[in-house]
Amino acid sequence: MRTRYFDNAATSWPKPPGVPRAVRRCLERGGGNAGRSGHAKALEASRTVLRARELLAELFRIADPSRILFTKNATEALNLALYGLLRPGDRVVTSSMEHNSVMRPLRHLARKGVALEVVPASAGGVIEAASFCAAVTAGTRLAVVTHASNVTGAVTDVAAIGAHCRRLGVPLLVDAAQTAGSLPIDVEALGVDYLAFSGHKGLLGPQGTGGLYVRAEDALEPLQRGGTGSRSDREEQPEFLPDRYESGTLNTPGIAGLGAGVQYLLHRGVTDVQAHEQGLLAMFLEGMAGTPGVSTYGPAGATGRTGVLSLNLSGLSCSEAGTQLEDRFGLLTRVGLHCAPLAHRSLGTFPEGTVRFSWGAFTRPGDVRAAARAVRLLAAAGGRRR
Amino acid sequence: MRLGRPARQGLLRELEGVVTFFGSHHAMRAERVLDGSGSRALLVPGPREISPNCGVALRFDYSRLEEVRELLDRSFVQYEAFHHYPHG
């Protein structure tokens, strides 16, 4: 039986051929440590890292590539921003659709005296810009919002929130883990001050890569300090970007692969990926339309969403459904709460969770037709059992 | 600019300007920006007496100092200092 991968929201697969090639080239021909010396191999490593930074800057329309800081994933980028900015007494606003990579640091910070306000999403799991903006008042230290839910794929109107935050002078941190590489992102047009992204999802790079874009660094404390290869005469952390936030040896092979992933996206065009993923969603919804016993979550229709569909089948627990989808149909999905318990409360699917299908740049229409067919067959079987 | 050894030696004699940086990102970016603009530039291990903070410095055509400075500023490259370093 052929296996079909539907877990791209967790990590994308397959990768463009240039990605493994770049990682391999870096490991076979590299050997240098970026920024640590002036010999040929160190310079080559530094050039690899610079190239990836420049490609990411082009993708997100960032004028100064040094404002992109490499981290090991979006979680580390979000932690850097949250712990780097928030102090006891500060007020932070976020939404009920956030992933635990935002919610857990914020709950921890709240115990330390940060005032946390969580704006509830609508019943469909959509973060309404108007209600979010109403909670962001002058004097709010930070607004944090996901660009798209990892559970429903619902896209947040970040531009409206960004415009409101800019008017009030409130910095905006956007979690782009689900959208970088899948939706066009222009940080200035969206009013983003901090953009956290993962490298191994829509950007098509290897795991262990991610980053944070920082519009202004003055207030942001580093998460860790250490060797940078620069200002080695000093025992204090350097103040300039990117070194202030990048202590220790970077994941140069991973970053080489990430650069190749971004290069692929720039060549193909993110709008093409977006149209592809949206077309597959329309096909998926159409393929299941009218099937009794299937509940889907998120906004109605195929627009304003990423390549994610969460659903439940009546008469089957989601873990049972996930097992059958794999065993009988070769479909690899993710079941449960997707690290976002509050989002599932907003949707009314807590604590059982949902079955999540997520596709990507290389998913084929035949894969989605097979998925829709499997859901129809399982729903019919579940119906017989009821 | 990546060159063979003889060409590199020849170019080094001609490029009398040295710009130093605090960090390697800025050195590498300066190299790319100058390469892209058609200015001759070469990354070198920084001469010790002028404080190479990140291990590398960039040799450039000193007669184009102002142009180079403006280009680096426009490209958000942070440098430490410019030096005139003839016959090095």
Image: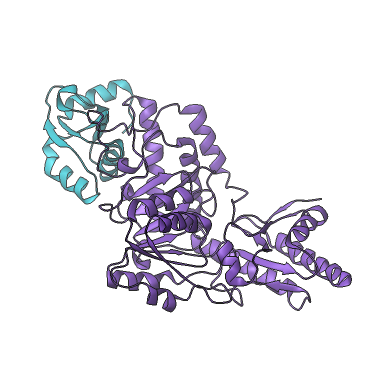
- Any idea which chain is the cyan one in this picture? B
Q: Residue at the spot x=27%, y=25% of the render?
A: B8
* Quadrant housing the C terminus of chain A: bottom right
The x, y position of residue A39, in whole percent, is 34, 24
Q: Residue furthest right?
A: A384
User: What percent of the width, then of the height, locates residue A239?
Assistant: 24, 42
Lateral position of residue B11 relative to residue A146, left or right: left
With B34 as the anchor, is A187 left or right in this view?
A: right
Which one is in front, A156 or A304? A156
Decide if residue A152 is in sight here: no
Residue in the image at 46% along x and 37% along y: A251
Q: Nearer the viewer, residue A368 or A84?
A: A84
Q: Position of residue A254 (x, y in %)?
A: 49, 39
| Of the pair A265 and B76, the residue shown nearer to us | B76
What colouring does the structure picture have?
A: by chain
Left or right: A158, with B85 as reference point: right
How many marks are shown on the rendered structure? Answer: 0
Q: Is residue B54 above or below residue A97?
A: above
Image quarter for residue A59? Answer: bottom left
The answer to whether residue A212 shows anywhere in this view is yes
Q: Where is A141 relative to B83, above or below? A: below
Q: Colour of chain A?
A: purple
The picture quadrant where one finds residue A337 is: bottom right
- Where residue A187 sits in the image (x, y, percent)? 37, 62
Residue toward you, A269 or B15: A269
Q: Quadrant of residue A165?
A: bottom left
At x 31%, y 26%, the residue is A38
